[in-house]
Image: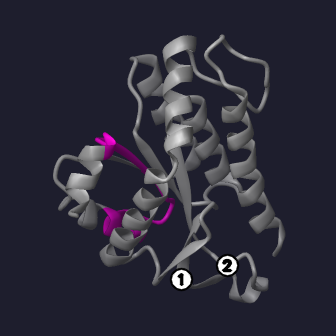
Amino acid sequence: MLIEQKLKDLGIEKLLIADDLPENINAAKEYFQGVDGLEVDYCDSGSLAIEKIQSKARVGEQYNFIMSDMEMESPESGLSVIREGFRNYTIGVIVTGRNYNQSDTAAHGPSTTILPTVKSVNGRKNKPEVWQQLFEKSIDHYEKQAPLRGALERSKKYSGESVNFRHRLEPVAAGIMPFLITMYLETYQEIEQVINNE
């Protein structure tokens, strides 16, 4: 199945990419300009990505998917971006060249990893074909997250406001399901476990 058809079937029309390296953004632009029907915004920092997510939310819009680097202006910028996405009903992944299982001298290896899936793609993000593989694998991950997507949609429908799970775990409204909170926390515990196992 062509990626465009899969995106249409999943309702993915708006994508946010966050990466602080210009060569990575340029490679992403080169790949994504060939994906029909997909609107892509690019950010060179985690703080700008968070600002874009919040800006969309203020006008009643949202991204359908987020792909963020991990280390930008801080070592955990990507986690902040993905958390903000969840607060605004958007699933995302971290795409990092950092190899958390290696010493600092070999920290950025020849492959790029998608978290929380821990799937890897050979090559770095400065090549369009790497972005293609990362995107296809990330969309496969997204497709398997049907329960989480459904829970996010229901919570959005019933709460009508952004969800701030980290700072208050009590329901924002009757529509917030306990399993949504559990799935959110488990996802980020997996990512943090990978990071902490340096």
Q: Is residue 100 left or right of residue 82?
A: right
Residue 22 visible in the displayed image: yes
Circle 2 residue? 99
Q: Counting other residues with Cα less than 10 Å from the Cα at mark 2, is it few (<14), some (14-19), or many (20 or more)?
A: some
- Where residue 191 appears, x then y in whole percent? 71, 59
Please state which of residues 94 and 173 is positioned toward the viewer in this rendering: 173
Circle 1 residue? 111
Residue 186: in magenta span:
no
Q: Check the image and tell me how it is coloured.
A: one colour
| Residue at x-position 37% and y-position 46% | 15
Q: Is residue 196 left or right of residue 188?
A: right
Distance, label 2 to label 1, CA atoms, is 8 Å
Residue 4's mark? none
Amino acid at dot 2: Asn
Magenta segment? 10-28
- Where residue 64 appears, x then y in whole percent? 40, 39
Pointer 2 with pointer 1, Cβ within 8 A: yes
| Residue at x-position 28% and y-position 50% | 7
Residue 12: in magenta span:
yes
Q: Is residue 133 left or right of residue 4?
A: right
Amino acid at dot 1: Ser
Please state which of residues 31 and 46 is positioned toward the viewer in this rendering: 31
Tag 1 secondary structure: strand
Q: Counting other residues with Cα less than 10 Å from the Cα at mark 1, is it few (<14), some (14-19), or many (20 or more)?
A: some
Considering only vertical position in the picture, is 15 above or below 174? below
Tag 2 secondary structure: loop
Name which of mark 2 and mark 1 comes first in the sequence: 2
Considering only vertical position in the picture, is 175 above or below 83? above
| Residue at x-position 57% and y-position 13% | 159
Q: Quadrant of the N terminus?
A: bottom left
Q: Quadrant of the C terminus?
A: bottom right
Considering only vertical position in the picture, is 33 above or below 112? above
